[in-house]
Amino acid sequence: MRGHAHVRSDPVYVAKAQLFRVLGHPVRVRILELLVDGERSVGDLQVRLDLDSSGTSQHLAALRQLGILESRREGTSTYYRLKDPRVSQLLAVAKQILASVLSDSQALLGDLTQPPAAP
Amino acid sequence: MRGHAHVRSDPVYVAKAQLFRVLGHPVRVRILELLVDGERSVGDLQVRLDLDSSGTSQHLAALRQLGILESRREGTSTYYRLKDPRVSQLLAVAKQILASVLSDSQALLGDLTQPPAAP
DNA sequence: TAAGAAACTTAGAAGTTAATGAGATATGAT
DNA sequence: ATCATATCTCATTAACTTCTAAGTTTCTTA
């Protein structure tokens, strides 16, 4: 059996949290979504994100360091792609959860506006 | 067509990032894993997390505000559970991604230690 | 080899999140 | 009512992340 470090410093939970934490930025989520469709150059991403080269590189570096991206260089451009297709799955599940969370709050908002009719 | 706000402030990407960001803490990941097995009281979670009541409440509040937890009160205790079973799925996919990321870095470590044999 | 384009790095300021400790509130039992 | 227990909130401070701007490296082509 594994000894149990305090959760806050247990490497297993720290690693899992790290994965989510790195995904926890709008630009990085968008980068991953763009890469779901296939490989893209930094310049291409930069244009689509409407971001400067410094910001683009920094966000790509965070994802690369996490180990979920691969890159290849071609001339002066660098192309990035997803290393693991399950990242697409993760994004898809997240989207579903978000949709249900949002529809719940929509429903709540509706209930507050017009109370339920009698059955 | 939807007008395109800058990604950093586009509500769609901000919301998706927010979901991941809230999951991005070791204690919150552990809380969700515990709740995958079913409802639990705050006190029970607190003991298993080896955390004080303030910390436990604050992390539960973050998950509750995100909209992925539900709670009911019974006497002096409050019981929390997952609102959406897809959260379990999200954790499972994350675990798979992590396993493949880790095995890649293990392999790399091995390659550095003993270079590949000739074919 | 000088100029230009593409990507990356670094450093510091600004902004955000987490940990801690003290205190508030709610429920049930005496 | 008083007390004990469970949970939650708030304020402060410490730790971390993000943004911006400037500068570096790498590669290509004139």
Image: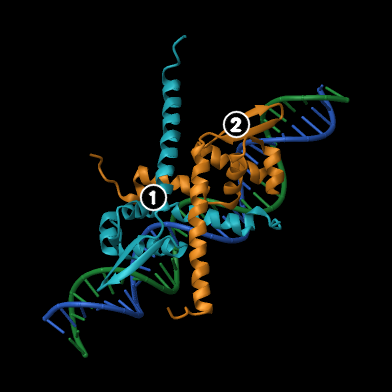
Chain colours: A orange, B cyan, C blue, D green
Number of residues whose C-alpha sits closer than 10 Å to that of mark 2, classed few (under 14), some (14–19) or many (20 or more): some
Circle 1 SS class:
helix
The reply to whether label 1 and label 2 mark residues of one chain is no
Residue B57 in the image: above or below residue C6: below
Q: Residue at x 54, y 54 (%)?
A: B16
- On the image, the x and y values in percent for residue A67 come to 50, 36
Circle 2 SS class:
strand
Report the residue marked by disc 2: A71
Number of residues whose C-alpha sits closer than 10 Å to that of mark 1, classed few (under 14), some (14–19) or many (20 or more): some
Disc 1 and disc 2: Cα gap in Å?
31 Å
What chain does mark 2 sit on? A
Report the residue marked by disc 1: B88
Mark in the foreground, 1 or 2:
1
Where, by quadrant of the figure, is residue C22 drawn? Answer: bottom left
Residue B118 in the image: above or below residue B66: above
- On the image, the x and y values in percent for residue C5 come to 78, 35
Where, by quadrant of the figure, is residue A70 drawn? Answer: top right
* Residue type highlighted by circle 2: Ser
Q: Residue at x 49, y 39 (%)?
A: A86
- On the image, the x and y values in percent for residue A29 come to 57, 48
The reply to whether callout 1 and callout 2 are in contact (CB within 8 Å) is no
What chain does mark 1 sit on? B
- On the image, the x and y values in percent for residue A96 come to 50, 53
Q: Which mark is residue A28?
A: none
Image quadrant in which the N terminus of chain B is located: bottom right
Residue C2 as seen in the image, left or right of residue B34: right
In the displayed orientation, state which residue is furthest to the top: B119
* Residue type highlighted by circle 1: Ser
Residue C12 as seen in the image, left or right of residue A19: right
Q: Residue at x 48, y 55 (%)?
A: A97
In the displayed orientation, state which residue is furthest to the front: A119
